[in-house]
Image: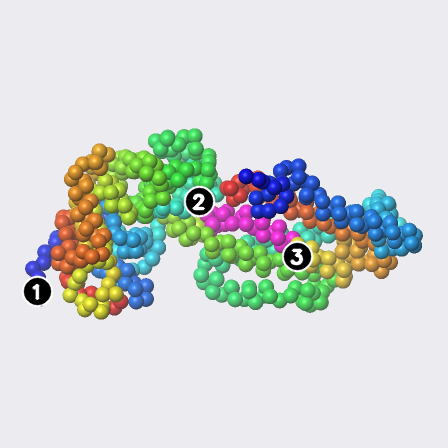
Amino acid sequence: MVHEINIGPDPEELRTRSILYIEDVYKAYGDNVILDDIDLSIAPGEFCAVVGPSGCGKSTLLRLILGQERTSSGRVLLNGCPIGHPDMDRGIVYQKYSLFPNLSAMDNILIGHKLRMWPWQWGSRKKDLTEKAMVFLGRAGMENHAHKYPHQLSGGQQQRVAVIQALFTRPKILLMDEPFSALDPGAREDMQMFLLELWEESRLTIFFVTHDLEEAAYLATRLVALSQHYSDERNPEELAKRGAKVVLDMRLRDVGAAAAPHIKSTAEFGALIQNIRRDAFEPGYRQHVKDFSLTHPHSFRTPSSFQGGQQNT
Amino acid sequence: MKTTRLLGLHAAPGVYLHWVLAALPFAFMICAYLLLSHRMLAENPNAKLLPSVGKMVESTVRLATQPDPRTGDYPFWTDTKASLKRLAVGVISAAIVGLLLGVNMAMFPGLNSMARAFITFLSIIPPLAILPVLFIIFGVDEVAKVVLIFIGSVFVITRDIYLATAALPLEQVTKALSLGASQLGVVYRVILPQVMPRLFNTARLTLGTAWLFLIAAEAIASTEGLGYRIYLMRRYMAMDVILPYVCWITLIGYTLDLGLRMWVVWRYPWYTK
């Protein structure tokens, strides 16, 4: 059976244009396939949110980009170069453990610069960098908390410091793994505003993993959904060996443009959430591989995506 | 709702009662001693087993304030100084080696593969069983005693620091790398400062066994030291010296433990939150 398939833009061209380029990526732990042929290309300045049911491999994908884990096959390129172990190109904010518990908020922000200098070089830069860090802390409304240890800060304050800490060394791409998931609703909304502000200003590329669909649709310019609930040409007995694929990839707004907070209450926003929830989150709703709604202009698939799975997993 | 002062899960003793209760076992012990001592001495004024308090104070004061006619030293203080020096050198060197070994083993898988089984193996050798070997190799001087304390402490410290380091979230390493740290920077400037308070707590626990090895080594071959004096006095059944010495050792140990605990609270406020 042959389907007419639109495989999207030319991968060669995307590879040179995008900051992050992921091609034919598989990740399996033994027999357990987590990621099943992921193709993804992200343009500079994009705020890309990745959603999906729990256990679908969102965080695994993030760790592959971070270099904390290796792909089983396929490649991940950052600015055209294969990624290696974690380094300064990729900043990271975790849900917790982002801050070093033995350092004050200020020292947590400064440590990136400190670690790259010999102690005797630090003296001449300290004043300048401390002032810069203080400006950031001021914007987060935390001037008076600079000398507190992380355990003396609230969850929201900790994550603010974590975001500043990650941005302070100017990474090429900022990875965020459920950064606001442990916060109460009020703190979470403040954090979202704070992050959007910094993002608009710095023109940073952000790769944001969350299980909260509303958060993703509000923050991101591009929304990617991963899911293991789909159907393809593979035998039913291979069903168990299926990992998550990109089942939805859509453009939400222009790169560089943050959404206004009030859109959350509009009817379109509600309808959008409903659609995405059905496509990506409902186990009973299985789209065929060829029917995925990959409408984002940078969305692409290599021919292997349609050959019914990988042999070497 | 009724809250008891003393008994049950929900008891709330209050500050005053707390201190009274804490003092009770001590008071009981002292009273029991005084009573038994009094009875024994009433039967036989020359009994040596449970000397009177006056006798103990007299003997201690004599050792602390009257120079030894042969050497000119004050035995109580030379003993204390000699023992504390051995203890300090042994435990501090064990702490430094244990810290470096433990942290590096936990951080570098290559070193871990090589060293872990070996360290575990060495840690099971009873240090006292190789004391004769140490005396043969290092002679009966200071070195053998310090080495015994070192061997008795270093593996426990290494293994504890290893566990503490391995238990730190992996995110901290990734995070430090993503902020631009080098591999050595991660180990020595990010991870090591985080396990320092654990080192002091481990040292507190290790001091107990360190005393054991110190006194054992001093008992066998020494010319001064708290353990030496106790074993020397045993020959004369001089309980009026032995008991104060035991109390003195206990007091020093308690002070060291308290000092280390206060140091951790003061120096690492983020650790005991």
| Residue A140 at x, y percent in the picture | 35, 33
**Callout 2 and callout 3 share a chain:** no
- Kind of residue at disc 1: Val
Quadrant location of the N terminus of chain B in the rendered image: top right
Residue sitting at 73 percent across and 52 percent down? B83
Which chain is indicated by disc 3? B
- Kind of residue at disc 2: Phe
Residue pointed to by mark 3: B209
As for residue B204 lying within the magenta part, the answer is yes
Residue sitting at 26 percent across and 53 percent down? A53
Could you say whether the residue bearing mark 3 is in a helix, strand or loop?
helix
The span picked out in magenta is: B187-207
Which chain is indicated by disc 2? A
**Above-or-below relation of A239 to B196:** below
Specify which label sits upstream in the sequence, 2 or 1: 1
Residue pointed to by mark 1: A2
Dot 3 surroundings within 10 Å: few (below 14), some, or many (20 or more)?
Answer: few
